[in-house]
Amino acid sequence: MVLASDILLIADDPSLRAHLSLMLSDQARPLVALASGSVSIDEVLRRRPSVIFVQDDLQGKEGLLLGTEILKRTQSIVVLIVSSEFRAVQAYESGIL
């Protein structure tokens, strides 16, 4: 089991946060979920999670850019939650799962 502090979710969509929290509930209790991309980098650097899930279409900050920024500053695994194959390819080419 992964410790709760090892998984971070960055998503401003409440239903997405709830759904992923439920999906990961047996892996991380309680899952740390952030609703803002703008404060996420500070929280990532403070917590140093092993895995970070990032919603692609965050308000105020594009998830792909945020994920790339996280990869440059940490050793975390970043997983981008996308809704199109094109964005998935862009994420993969940037080193994001």
Image (tube, grey):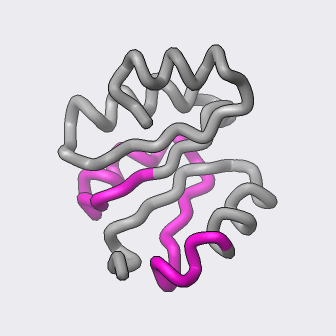
Q: Residue furthest right?
A: 15
In x, y percent, where is residue 90? 51, 16
What residue sits 20% from the left and 43% below the top? 74
Residue 67 in the image: x percent, y percent?
42, 33
Does residue 70 appear to the left or right of 16 in the view shown?
left
Image height check: is 25 above or below 90?
below
Q: Give the extent of the magenta segment.
A: 23-52
Q: Is residue 11 left or right of residue 40?
A: right
| 67 over 16 or under it: above or below | above
Q: How many marks?
A: 0
Q: Is residue 87 left or right of residue 42?
A: right
Residue 48 in the magenta stretch? The answer is yes
Q: Note whether 27 is above or below 71 in the view shown.
A: below
Q: Which quadrant, please, contains the N terminus?
A: bottom left
Residue 46 in magenta stretch: yes
Quadrant occupied by the C terminus: top left
User: At which x and y percent is residue 5?
Assistant: 34, 74
Residue at 51% over, 74% down: 31
Which residue is drawn at the image coordinates 53% and 41% (left, top)?
Answer: 37
> Which picture quadrant has residue 3?
bottom left
The reply, left or right, for residue 56 in relation to residue 89 is: right
- Residue 59: image x %, image y %? 68, 34
Residue appearing at x 28%, y 63% in the figure:
47
Q: Nearer the viewer, residue 23 or 48?
A: 23
